[in-house]
Image (spheres, grey):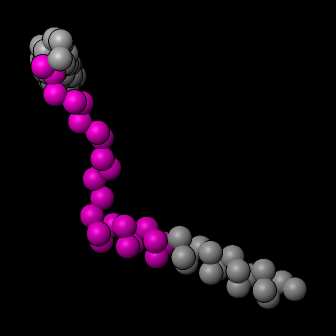
């Protein structure tokens, strides 16, 4: 149990240090010399995108087929 508590405390300390470092970097620039903030972009590969489209197509086709057979 003590090992888990130590590991949990260590993770918390590292996380807090990283948070402070990131916050400090965000406030490092002042005035008009600051570069524009980066735009967040979802990280998705072509394979994952194709798989998502295939899954949606399968759901739509199965729903359409069930409705067609119901009538």
On screen, residue 37 versus residue 48, left or right, reads left
- Residue 52 horizontal side relative to residue 40, left or right: right
Considering depth in this image, is 24 or 58 the residue closer to the camera? 24
Identity of the residue drawn at 24% across and 30% down: 37
Please tell me which residue is depicted at 29% across the width and 39% down the height of the picture: 39
Q: For this rendering, which residue is in front, 24 or 68?
A: 24
Query: For residue 60, which quarter of the picture?
Result: bottom right
- Magenta segment, which residues? 33-55
As displayed, is residue 29 above or below residue 51? above
Q: Is residue 20 magenta?
A: no
Eyeballing the image, is 32 above or below 45?
above
Image quadrant for the C terminus? bottom right
Q: What x and y, as percent, mark residue 11? A: 17, 23
- Quarter occupied by residue 36: top left
Q: Nearer the viewer, residue 62 or 8?
A: 62
Q: Residue at x 33, y 66 (%)?
A: 48
How far across and how far down the image is residue 19, in percent?
19, 18
Q: Position of residue 15 (x, y in %)?
A: 18, 21
Whether residue 16 can be seen here: no
- Closer to us: 4 or 20: 20
Q: Is residue 4 above or below residue 57?
A: above
The residue positioned 29% from the left and 69% from the top of the image is 46
């Amino acid at each position: 149990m003590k090992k888990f508590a130590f590991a949990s405390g260590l993770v918390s300390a590292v996380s807090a240090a990283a948070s402070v470092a990131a916050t400090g970097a965000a406030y490092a620039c002042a005035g008009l010399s600051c570069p524009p903030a980066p735009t967040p972009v979802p990280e998705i590969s072509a394979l994952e995108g194709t798989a998502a489209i295939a899954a949606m197509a399968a759901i739509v086709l199965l729903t359409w087929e069930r409705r067609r057979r119901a009538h």
